[in-house]
Amino acid sequence: MGTTKIPSELTKQRIYCDEMSKSSKQSTFSALVAVVTLLIFMGWMHIMLAMLALSFFYKGMSVILLILLCTLALPAKPVLWHAFCRQYIFKTWREYFHFSYLFEAPLDTKKKYVFVEFPHGVFPLGPLLGATASQLMEPRFDVYSLGASSVFSVPFWRHVITWLGCVGATTENFRRKLKRGSVAVIVGGIAEMYMQREDREQIKLRDRKGFVRVAVESGSDGIVPVYHFGNSQLLDFYPQSWSRISRRLRAALGFVYGRFGLPLPRKVELFMVCGKPIPVRQVDRSDPSFAAAVEELHAKVVQAVQKLYDDHKAEYGWADRPLEVC
């Protein structure tokens, strides 16, 4: 598996992962592995529900389901397991989506950035593949991430995401990880799962300021806006009317479908663009100017995300597709 350039060497150059090129085609074997494993991973909740239904009729299925549930008792400490991130399966996924990325400015892998990623989509496969791609860099670019607490209650998923360096999305976890290094936050969260539009991109940001507060009080080395072009087109979620109750429960309710009507992501090219770091001025929460500092920085983030999208949408083929920041 080939390595790729480190962020400190990249200046507005689009890079295709795994030594791919713009015209590369995925091999039949790689595509087969990607389809089967993506279908299992993305359809895992459907599989679990099917196993639950079958357990009423087949004792053996009850045993299998019980074993899976017992894995929830096993330790699941976020470790950012580098060898796991470099597994062949993730390579086939990157090839399936013809994954590429671009850094607008050099980044210091030793600094502590807050990466704010958009959009979440039905499932954040773009951010997931971005995390695996960062482990192909020399030196490695270690970035921990925050995820919905409900995901950590699902067998199999629980351990996969922790091995990718994901922790529960709490303020305390955010602060703790930021002290050690960079942290990625998918700001729109569950709300963006229900924001799929045919005529435009739509993200949730204007009322999301928690990540800015943590960055300001912690004195982060910068907030880096990240946009994953194509992530909103991989899957659909139904019904969208369940969005309010899902946010209250902090768990997505509904049915996922994509290619062939299955929970298989569509074969859409994914393009990750990382913007220039936005400087952060450290201010203590007890300081009277803290709220003003948060508002000022949040406004800069909104502006930067909009500009990042507008500057690169044509390269992705979305010149006429606007971004709506909600």
Image: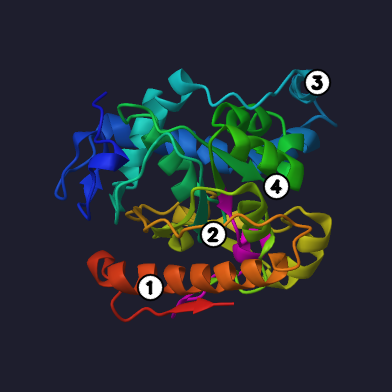
**Which sits in the foreground, 16 or 185?**
185
Give the amino acid type for the residue marked by disc 3 in the picture: Ala
Q: Secondary structure at mark 3?
A: helix
Q: Label 1, on which residue? A: 307
Q: In the rendered structure, which disc, 1 or 2, sits on the residue that comes first in sequence?
A: 2
The residue under the point 41% across, 23% down is 87
Q: Secondary structure at mark 4?
A: loop
Q: Secondary structure at mark 1?
A: helix
Badge 4 crowding class, 10 Å Cα cut-off, few under 14, some 14 to 19, many 20 or more, is some
Q: In the rendered structure, which disc, 1 or 3, sits on the residue that comes first in sequence?
A: 3
The residue under the point 70% across, 59% down is 254
Q: In the rendered structure, which disc, 2 or 3, sits on the residue that comes first in sequence?
A: 3
> Marks 1/4: CA distance?
28 Å
Q: Secondary structure at mark 2?
A: loop
Q: Label 4, on which residue? A: 148
x, y percent for residue 137: 32, 31
Query: Given this view, does label 1 or label 3 mark the residue nearer the observer?
Result: 1
Q: Label 3, on which residue? A: 73
- The span picked out in magenta is 185-201
Q: Label 2, on which residue? A: 121
Q: How is the image coloured?
A: rainbow
Query: Given this view, does label 1 or label 4 mark the residue nearer the observer?
Result: 1
**Which sits in the foreground, 262 or 299?**
299
> Marks 1/2: CA distance?
20 Å
x, y percent for residue 257: 55, 56
Instruction: Assess whether residue 193 is covered by the magenta stretch.
Output: yes
Give the amino acid type for the residue marked by disc 4 in the picture: Ala
Image position of 125 with respect to 326: above or below: above
Give the amino acid type for the residue marked by disc 2 in the picture: Gly
